[in-house]
Image (cartoon, rainbow, N blue to C red):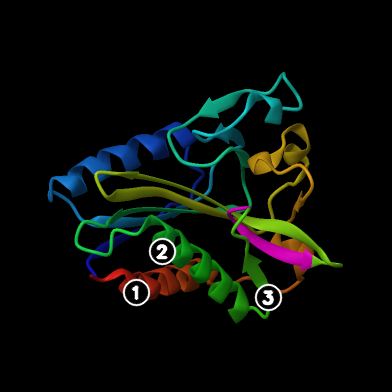
Protein backbone atom coordinates (compact mmCIF):
# COMPACT_ATOMS: atom_id res chain seq x y z
CA UNK A 1 0.00 0.00 0.00
CA UNK A 2 1.27 3.43 -0.92
CA UNK A 3 0.43 5.32 2.27
CA UNK A 4 2.37 8.34 3.47
CA UNK A 5 3.42 8.03 7.14
CA UNK A 6 3.65 11.37 8.91
CA UNK A 7 4.75 11.92 12.53
CA UNK A 8 4.61 15.29 14.28
CA UNK A 9 6.94 15.73 17.26
CA UNK A 10 5.36 18.95 18.56
CA UNK A 11 1.67 19.30 19.58
CA UNK A 12 -0.59 20.19 16.65
CA UNK A 13 -3.58 22.50 17.04
CA UNK A 14 -6.83 20.62 16.45
CA UNK A 15 -8.09 23.07 13.83
CA UNK A 16 -4.83 22.81 11.87
CA UNK A 17 -4.98 19.01 11.88
CA UNK A 18 -8.61 19.00 10.78
CA UNK A 19 -7.90 21.46 7.97
CA UNK A 20 -5.08 19.27 6.67
CA UNK A 21 -7.16 16.08 6.89
CA UNK A 22 -10.08 17.61 5.01
CA UNK A 23 -7.81 19.02 2.31
CA UNK A 24 -6.01 15.69 1.97
CA UNK A 25 -9.28 13.75 1.73
CA UNK A 26 -10.34 15.94 -1.20
CA UNK A 27 -6.97 15.43 -2.91
CA UNK A 28 -7.20 11.65 -2.44
CA UNK A 29 -10.74 11.66 -3.86
CA UNK A 30 -9.37 13.36 -6.98
CA UNK A 31 -6.47 10.86 -7.14
CA UNK A 32 -4.07 13.77 -6.69
CA UNK A 33 -2.34 12.60 -3.50
CA UNK A 34 -1.49 9.51 -1.44
CA UNK A 35 -3.42 8.05 1.44
CA UNK A 36 -2.13 9.18 4.83
CA UNK A 37 -1.42 8.00 8.37
CA UNK A 38 -0.52 10.82 10.75
CA UNK A 39 0.66 10.36 14.35
CA UNK A 40 0.53 13.42 16.63
CA UNK A 41 -0.52 14.94 19.93
CA UNK A 42 -2.95 17.80 20.47
CA UNK A 43 -2.88 20.67 22.86
CA UNK A 44 -5.71 20.38 25.42
CA UNK A 45 -9.12 20.65 23.72
CA UNK A 46 -12.67 19.31 23.98
CA UNK A 47 -14.15 18.15 20.68
CA UNK A 48 -17.68 17.06 19.80
CA UNK A 49 -18.76 14.72 17.02
CA UNK A 50 -21.94 14.86 14.99
CA UNK A 51 -24.07 12.93 17.51
CA UNK A 52 -23.09 14.76 20.70
CA UNK A 53 -25.66 16.15 23.15
CA UNK A 54 -25.26 19.37 25.13
CA UNK A 55 -26.39 17.34 28.13
CA UNK A 56 -22.97 15.65 27.95
CA UNK A 57 -21.29 18.92 29.01
CA UNK A 58 -21.09 18.90 32.82
CA UNK A 59 -18.99 22.05 33.22
CA UNK A 60 -20.81 24.62 31.07
CA UNK A 61 -17.79 26.99 31.17
CA UNK A 62 -15.58 24.83 28.94
CA UNK A 63 -15.17 25.54 25.23
CA UNK A 64 -16.22 22.82 22.80
CA UNK A 65 -14.93 22.50 19.25
CA UNK A 66 -17.69 20.98 17.12
CA UNK A 67 -16.42 18.78 14.32
CA UNK A 68 -17.78 16.61 11.51
CA UNK A 69 -16.42 13.30 12.76
CA UNK A 70 -18.71 10.61 14.07
CA UNK A 71 -19.19 10.14 17.80
CA UNK A 72 -19.89 12.40 20.73
CA UNK A 73 -17.78 14.54 23.07
CA UNK A 74 -14.23 13.80 24.24
CA UNK A 75 -11.02 15.46 25.36
CA UNK A 76 -7.63 15.51 23.63
CA UNK A 77 -4.36 16.57 25.19
CA UNK A 78 -0.66 15.85 25.75
CA UNK A 79 0.15 12.22 26.55
CA UNK A 80 -2.56 10.97 24.20
CA UNK A 81 -1.58 9.41 20.88
CA UNK A 82 -3.69 10.66 17.99
CA UNK A 83 -3.79 8.27 15.04
CA UNK A 84 -5.27 10.11 12.07
CA UNK A 85 -5.70 8.74 8.59
CA UNK A 86 -7.07 9.42 5.14
CA UNK A 87 -7.93 6.08 3.55
CA UNK A 88 -9.50 5.49 0.11
CA UNK A 89 -12.24 2.85 0.39
CA UNK A 90 -13.45 3.14 -3.20
CA UNK A 91 -11.42 0.14 -4.40
CA UNK A 92 -12.00 -1.84 -1.21
CA UNK A 93 -15.07 -3.49 0.32
CA UNK A 94 -17.43 -0.62 1.02
CA UNK A 95 -18.19 -1.76 4.56
CA UNK A 96 -17.87 0.94 7.21
CA UNK A 97 -18.62 -1.46 10.08
CA UNK A 98 -15.80 -3.72 8.84
CA UNK A 99 -13.49 -0.70 8.60
CA UNK A 100 -14.22 0.29 12.20
CA UNK A 101 -13.60 -3.34 13.19
CA UNK A 102 -10.18 -3.11 11.53
CA UNK A 103 -9.39 -0.05 13.66
CA UNK A 104 -10.56 -1.85 16.80
CA UNK A 105 -8.54 -4.97 16.02
CA UNK A 106 -5.42 -2.93 15.26
CA UNK A 107 -5.56 -1.31 18.71
CA UNK A 108 -6.38 -4.58 20.51
CA UNK A 109 -3.56 -6.43 18.74
CA UNK A 110 -1.11 -3.61 19.48
CA UNK A 111 -1.94 -3.60 23.19
CA UNK A 112 -1.65 -7.40 23.15
CA UNK A 113 2.01 -6.94 22.18
CA UNK A 114 2.41 -5.23 25.57
CA UNK A 115 0.52 -8.04 27.38
CA UNK A 116 -2.55 -5.82 27.89
CA UNK A 117 -5.87 -7.51 27.09
CA UNK A 118 -8.57 -5.16 25.82
CA UNK A 119 -11.84 -5.57 23.99
CA UNK A 120 -14.29 -3.80 21.69
CA UNK A 121 -17.93 -3.22 22.61
CA UNK A 122 -20.65 -3.23 19.94
CA UNK A 123 -22.86 -0.93 22.03
CA UNK A 124 -20.11 1.51 23.02
CA UNK A 125 -17.61 2.20 20.24
CA UNK A 126 -14.02 2.29 21.43
CA UNK A 127 -11.51 0.01 23.12
CA UNK A 128 -12.03 -1.08 26.70
CA UNK A 129 -9.93 -2.53 29.54
CA UNK A 130 -11.52 -4.56 32.33
CA UNK A 131 -10.49 -3.27 35.75
CA UNK A 132 -11.94 -5.29 38.65
CA UNK A 133 -14.79 -6.41 36.44
CA UNK A 134 -15.66 -2.93 35.17
CA UNK A 135 -14.85 -1.75 31.64
CA UNK A 136 -12.78 1.44 31.35
CA UNK A 137 -12.16 3.19 28.05
CA UNK A 138 -8.58 3.40 26.83
CA UNK A 139 -9.14 4.39 23.18
CA UNK A 140 -11.83 6.43 21.42
CA UNK A 141 -12.72 6.14 17.73
CA UNK A 142 -14.28 8.80 15.51
CA UNK A 143 -14.46 8.40 11.74
CA UNK A 144 -16.02 10.35 8.89
CA UNK A 145 -16.58 8.81 5.46
CA UNK A 146 -17.23 11.15 2.52
CA UNK A 147 -17.46 9.81 -1.04
CA UNK A 148 -15.88 6.62 0.37
CA UNK A 149 -12.81 8.45 1.62
CA UNK A 150 -12.44 7.71 5.35
CA UNK A 151 -10.68 10.19 7.61
CA UNK A 152 -10.23 11.35 11.21
CA UNK A 153 -9.20 8.28 13.27
CA UNK A 154 -8.73 7.32 16.90
CA UNK A 155 -6.95 8.39 20.07
CA UNK A 156 -5.13 6.12 22.50
CA UNK A 157 -4.70 7.27 26.09
CA UNK A 158 -1.11 6.62 27.12
CA UNK A 159 -0.17 9.03 29.91
CA UNK A 160 -2.65 11.88 29.46
CA UNK A 161 -4.28 13.78 32.32
CA UNK A 162 -7.66 12.15 33.10
CA UNK A 163 -9.04 15.07 35.13
CA UNK A 164 -10.53 16.93 32.11
CA UNK A 165 -12.92 14.02 31.51
CA UNK A 166 -14.73 14.91 34.76
CA UNK A 167 -16.11 18.03 33.05
CA UNK A 168 -17.93 16.04 30.38
CA UNK A 169 -19.72 12.73 29.83
CA UNK A 170 -17.00 11.15 27.67
CA UNK A 171 -18.45 9.79 24.42
CA UNK A 172 -21.90 10.12 26.01
CA UNK A 173 -21.26 7.13 28.32
CA UNK A 174 -22.03 8.08 31.93
CA UNK A 175 -21.61 4.74 33.69
CA UNK A 176 -18.05 3.88 32.61
CA UNK A 177 -14.70 5.50 33.38
CA UNK A 178 -11.84 6.58 31.14
CA UNK A 179 -8.35 5.23 31.82
CA UNK A 180 -4.88 5.32 30.26
CA UNK A 181 -2.04 2.86 29.73
CA UNK A 182 0.06 4.41 32.49
CA UNK A 183 -2.65 3.45 35.01
CA UNK A 184 -2.95 -0.04 33.56
CA UNK A 185 0.76 -0.87 33.41
CA UNK A 186 4.08 0.65 34.49
CA UNK A 187 5.98 -0.66 31.46
CA UNK A 188 7.32 1.66 28.78
CA UNK A 189 5.29 1.74 25.60
CA UNK A 190 8.26 2.08 23.28
CA UNK A 191 7.51 2.13 19.55
CA UNK A 192 3.76 1.78 20.17
CA UNK A 193 3.09 4.20 17.31
CA UNK A 194 5.07 2.03 14.87
CA UNK A 195 3.28 -1.12 16.04
CA UNK A 196 -0.12 0.58 15.58
CA UNK A 197 0.84 1.64 12.06
CA UNK A 198 2.02 -1.87 11.13
CA UNK A 199 -1.11 -3.53 12.53
CA UNK A 200 -3.44 -1.04 10.85
CA UNK A 201 -1.80 -1.38 7.43
CA UNK A 202 -1.76 -5.17 7.75
CA UNK A 203 -5.42 -5.33 8.79
CA UNK A 204 -6.48 -2.98 5.99
CA UNK A 205 -5.71 -5.81 3.57
CA UNK A 206 -8.84 -7.53 4.89
CA UNK A 207 -10.84 -4.84 3.10
CA UNK A 208 -9.43 -5.56 -0.32
CA UNK A 209 -12.26 -6.14 -2.77
Q: In front: mark 3 or mark 1?
A: 1
Q: Residue 74: horizontal and vertical position, in percent?
A: 62, 40
Badge 1 crowding class, 10 Å Cα cut-off, few under 14, some 14 to 19, many 20 or more, is few
Residue 58 higher or lower than 93, as above or below: above
Residue 29 higher or lower than 131, as above or below: above
Q: Secondary structure at mark 3?
A: loop
Earlier-in-chain disc, 3 versus 1: 3
Task: Pick the residue in front: 136 or 22.
Answer: 136
Badge 3 crowding class, 10 Å Cα cut-off, few under 14, some 14 to 19, many 20 or more, is some
Q: Residue furthest right?
A: 132
Earlier-in-chain disc, 3 versus 2: 2
Q: Which numbered tag is attached to residue 206?
A: 1
Using the numbered discs, state the Cα–Cα distance from disc 3 to disc 2 in whole angstroms: 21 Å
| Residue at (44% x, 67% y) in the render | 102
Using the numbered discs, state the Cα–Cα distance from disc 2 to disc 1 in whole angstroms: 9 Å
Task: Pick the residue in front: 178 or 50.
Answer: 50
Q: Secondary structure at mark 1?
A: helix
Residue 21 higher or lower than 39, as above or below: above
Using the numbered discs, state the Cα–Cα distance from disc 3 to disc 1 in whole angstroms: 22 Å
Q: In front: mark 3 or mark 2?
A: 2
On the image, which quarter does residue 4 sit in? Answer: bottom left
Q: Residue 6: horizontal and vertical position, in percent?
A: 36, 57
- What residue did someone put label 3 on? 117
- What residue did someone put label 2 on? 98
Q: Secondary structure at mark 2?
A: helix
Look at the numbered discs 2 and 1 and tell me whether their residues touch, using CB distance below 8 Å: yes
Give, as a single range, the part of the protein colored magenta: 124-130
Residue 177 part of the magenta segment: no
Horizontally, residue 169 falls left or right of residue 146, namely right
Amino acid sequence: MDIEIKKSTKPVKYYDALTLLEARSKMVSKNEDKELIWILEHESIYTAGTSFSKNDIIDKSIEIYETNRGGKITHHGPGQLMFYFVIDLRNKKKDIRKFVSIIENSIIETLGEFKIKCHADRKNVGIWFKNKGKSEKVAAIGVRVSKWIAYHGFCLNIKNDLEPYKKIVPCGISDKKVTNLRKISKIKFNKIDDILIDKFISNLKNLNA
